[in-house]
Amino acid sequence: MPPGADPPQDLRFCRSADGTRLAYAVHGAGPPLLLASCWLSHLEFDWQSPVWRHFLLDIGRFATVVRYDERGYGLSDREVPDYGLDARLADLEAVADAAGLDRFALLGMSQGGPVAVSYAVRHPDRLSRLVLYGTYAVAISRDPEGAELEQTFQQMIKVGFGRKDSTFRRVFTTLMIPDATEEQAGWLDDLQAVATSPDNAVRSRAARMRVDVSDLAPAVTVPTLVLHARGDRMVEFARGRELAARIPGARFVTLDSDNHITLAHEAAWPVLLDELAAFLAADRIAARAPDAVLRLLTERELDVLRLVGRGDDNQEVARQLAMSVRTVERHLTSVYSKLGLSGRSARAAAVARLLTHG
């Protein structure tokens, strides 16, 4: 590879639980970040994209990025029987296992968000943290107007995605990236024709529009960052904010943009990149030196954690260390914060970190 050249992506394949062949790609350096992506993707076509190229390369400078074409799309099997949430969750599980990811960060984008939320609830011990970008708990409003609009979209996909003329596809392009250059808009027009067949696009969209993870979101226990563009026309800003409100302790960041996909020339892009890099910083520290995170703890915090690891409850820890239970709780809260842990599994995860590296 010539000096200064961008590293290539490594294309691989695996099988989901129902036998569907999935294509996935790996690039970048750093702790792993698995992307549960949007409904339009093609691993090879995206790699040279004026819409996605900056996203992939910039994030790949601080994370090992694993992404995949969903069933029915891109290089994955096109003829599939099921586009439901359970099948898509099984696909994510298969990719994570095939890529050898023991513990990783997960980024759910657009219609990949509900799959990411579902995975976080089912496999909290596999995740270090969760990022949700331009996504939702409920895809569309359940009122008659929302249903009618969705029927219109599906009809446009059915009659327009396979045509040489991109007029119908340009409607979706304009909703996704209204501030795009003509080059960027033209590429997204083409992606919609390349990524899948009109029939697949209709069937998969119909299944996605039935998804509702509102009741699952409060059960997310991993640290969570939610990013959403204020003027997003594909997924309303209010839906992203509502999703963040349902996840305990989630941090919500507003991007000053009208684009569903944040473009390289926007002021919002470095904001998104900085937020993501900062959120993943603890993973990078842990990846460079496994015990470096534990060095952030004070001696007293380590004393508390060692007793907790022995199985003592807070009352017994307080008695052993001659401090109040409230002080023990404060020390543990500090430990969880420094280790990037939250929720019901934080105590067990902190002990596991101590036993592994302490």
Image: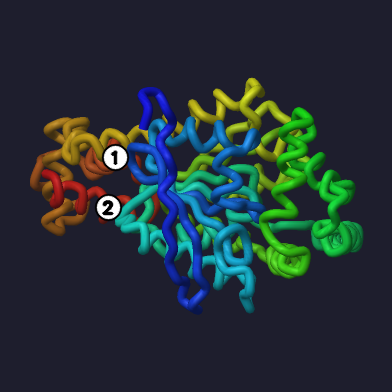
**Local SS, label 2:** helix
Count residues near mark 1 (Cα–Cα under 10 Å), then give few for <14, some for 14-19, many for 20+: many
Q: Is residue 282 above or below residue 344?
A: above
Q: Quadrant of the N terminus?
A: top left
User: Residue 137 location in percent, x, y?
Assistant: 64, 56
User: Left of 339 or right of it: where is 51?
Assistant: right
Farthest residue to the left: give it. 320
Residue drawn at (75%, 67%), measured in percent from left and top?
A: 206
Q: Which amino acid type is marked by label 1?
A: Leu
Query: Spatial distance from mark 2 to mark 1, Cα to Cα?
Result: 9 Å
Mark 2 highlights which residue?
Answer: 349
Packing grade of label 2 (10 A; few <14, some 14-19, many >=20) is some
Q: Nearer the viewer, residue 2 or 67?
A: 2
Disc 2 marks which amino acid?
A: Ala
On the question of residue 129 being in view, the answer is no
Label 1 sits on a secondary structure element that is loop
Percent of width and height locating residue 312: 15, 56
- Left or right relative to 41: residue 144: right
Residue 96 appears at what percent x and percent y? Answer: 40, 59
Name the residue beneath numbered marker 1: 339
